[in-house]
């Protein structure tokens, strides 16, 4: 199994620590841990964080054929907390994550590509992704849209929906996407899944995270566009240590099993199991 992940490597900079992450990096790492040949197309800053990034790529077994070095600083998200310990996130502009420059031979093919919206915040990266999707063969195209204010537009949302075969969104993102595609804002998650399925014929599967507060009460809804059928699975009840990266592990496990042609219910079950394990650990990509 050969999967290409396109997008950000993003360091989360807390007041007391710095941790590597980014939805696309995390997904690539989990795909590698699961057993896929996991390639990442991204850019690394010419700084100390860039040096550390290479060490993590090696640690997780992510293939670096399409990693380039940028003269810009490494992608960073500054995390701060108010007096109530509510976090705020500031994703720095004009960093290495905006400077993806690798090329892939048109003769190459992959079982899937995994991408999101954040790395499309600049025209350069968006054009790179468009060219990639036009010239390289991907059997499946998995998009975890992962909307981050203010780094999205109606055009980017539309591009994701027009190109993905498997789409993952959250309940919180639904109103934004409804407005972008001019859908009736009163549609519930099932009606909205049917709307997207009817409008975007490329979609095969729609995953919606129906969060109700903490991760242990999260429900995943899968809409099989071909069968016009819904599948539901509640998260396992575990002691949550950190929910950071749990959604990325879910994406990787679902895609990995989907590419193995497992039934949708099996894909959902394995994805829920892995994300439940990840939230019991501090690391976003713990040892399995």
Image (spheres, rainbow, N blue to C red):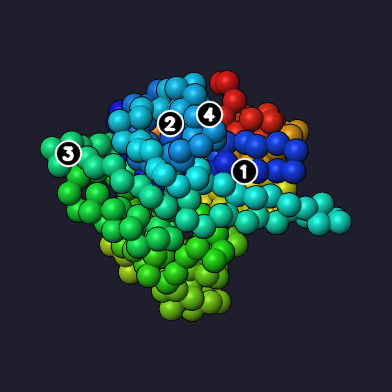
| Nearer to us: label 3 or label 4 | 4
Marks 3 and 1, Cα distance to the nearest angstrom?
33 Å
Query: Label 2, on which residue?
Result: 31
Query: Label 3, on which residue?
Result: 105
Marks 1 and 4, Cα distance to the nearest angstrom?
13 Å
Circle 4 Cα neighbour tier, 10 Å, few/some/many (<14 / 14–19 / ≥20): few
| Nearer to us: label 2 or label 4 | 4
Considering depth in this image, is 32 or 265 the residue closer to the camera?
A: 32
Q: Position of residue 206 (x, y in %)?
A: 43, 54
Query: Which image quadrant for residue 65?
Result: top left
Circle 2 Cα neighbour tier, 10 Å, few/some/many (<14 / 14–19 / ≥20): many
Does dot 4 land on a helix, a strand or a loop?
helix
Residue 12: image tag = 1
Considering depth in this image, is 174 or 22 the residue closer to the camera?
A: 22
Vertical placement of 156 versus 262: above or below? Answer: below
| Nearer to us: label 2 or label 1 | 1
Q: Earlier in the sequence, mark 2 or mark 4?
A: 2
Marks 2 and 4, Cα distance to the nearest angstrom?
20 Å
Query: Which image quadrant for residue 173?
Result: bottom right
Q: Is residue 213 left or right of residue 55?
A: right
Circle 3 Cα neighbour tier, 10 Å, few/some/many (<14 / 14–19 / ≥20): few
Residue 224 in view in this figure:
no
| Nearer to us: label 1 or label 4 | 4
Residue 102 in view in this figure:
yes
Query: Label 4, on which residue?
Result: 52
- Contact, mark 3 vs mark 4 (Cβ under 8 Å): no
């Amino acid at each position: 199994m050969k999967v290409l992940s396109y997008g950000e490597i993003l360091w989360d900079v807390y007041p007391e620590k710095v941790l590597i992450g980014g939805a696309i990096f995390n997904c690539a790492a989990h795909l590698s841990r699961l057993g896929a040949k996991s390639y990442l197309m991204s850019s690394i800053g010419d700084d100390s964080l860039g040096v550390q990034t290479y060490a993590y790529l090696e640690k997780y077994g992510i293939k670096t054929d399409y990693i380039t070095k940028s003269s810009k600083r490494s992608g960073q998200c500054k995390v701060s907390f108010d007096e109530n310990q509510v976090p705020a996130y500031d994703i720095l502009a004009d960093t290495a994550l905006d400077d993806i420059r690798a090329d892939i031979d048109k003769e190459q093919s992959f079982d899937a590509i995994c991408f999101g919206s954040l790395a499309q915040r600049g025209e350069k990266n968006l054009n790179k992704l468009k060219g990639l999707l036009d010239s390289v063969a991907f059997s499946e195209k998995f998009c975890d849209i992962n909307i981050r204010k203010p780094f999205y537009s109606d055009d980017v949302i539309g591009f994701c929906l027009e190109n993905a075969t498997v789409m993952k969104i959250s309940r919180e993102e639904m109103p934004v996407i409804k407005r972008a595609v001019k859908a009736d804002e009163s549609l519930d998650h099932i009606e909205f899944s049917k709307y997207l399925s009817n409008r975007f014929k490329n979609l095969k599967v729609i995953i919606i995270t129906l969060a109700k507060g903490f991760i242990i009460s999260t429900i995943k809804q899968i809409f099989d566009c071909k069968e016009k059928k819904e599948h539901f699975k509640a998260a396992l009840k575990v002691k949550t240590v950190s929910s950071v990266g749990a959604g990325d592990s879910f994406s990787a496990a679902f895609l990995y099993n989907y590419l193995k042609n497992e039934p949708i219910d099996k894909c959902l079950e394995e994805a829920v199991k892995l994300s439940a394990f990840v939230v019991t650990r501090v690391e976003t990509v713990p040892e399995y």
